[in-house]
Amino acid sequence: MTELFGGFSPDFYAAYRATYPLDSGYTTRKTLYNLYHILNHLNLFGGGYLSQSESMIDQLLAEI
């Protein structure tokens, strides 16, 4: 979720990945897990998140 709303510096992620390498499928899982939060924001705050949620869903469906 750290990459969803701004995140940390590239140095942080480089150090993290040097210590804990990412498993295969990370990008897909990240999109799926973050979709939950975007859908929640859509529910709470309205249509401003609709386009982002649709884009994430399209991206996930394209990977099937």
Image (cartoon, rainbow, N blue to C red):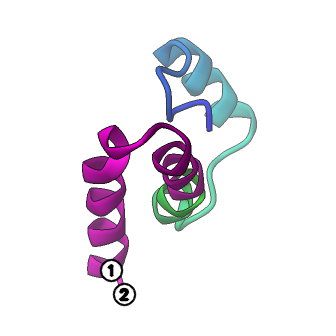
Instruction: Examine the rendered structure and indicate whether residue 12 appears above or below residue 16.
Output: above
- Pointer 1 local density, CA inside 10 Å: few below 14, some 14–19, many at least 20: few
Residue bearing the label numbered 2: 64
* Residue drawn where x is 66% and y is 46% of the image: 21
* Residue drawn where x is 58% and y is 57% of the image: 36
Say whether residue 9 is left or right of residue 23: left
Q: Do labels 2 and 1 touch, CB within 8 Å? A: yes
- The residue lying toward the viewer, choosing from 6 and 48, is 48
Q: Residue furthest right?
A: 19
Predominant SS along the magenta part = helix
Instruction: Specify start and end residues of the magenta stretch as a single range.
Output: 35-64
Residue 43 sits inside the magenta stretch: yes
For the C terminus, the image quarter is bottom left
The x and y percentages for residue 18 are 65, 32
- The residue lying toward the viewer, choosing from 16 and 3, is 3
Give the quarter of the image for residue 60: bottom left
* Residue drawn where x is 29% and y is 67% of the image: 59
Please, what secondary structure does the residue beneath circle 1 have?
helix
Say whether residue 20 is left or right of residue 62: right
For the N terminus, the image quarter is top right
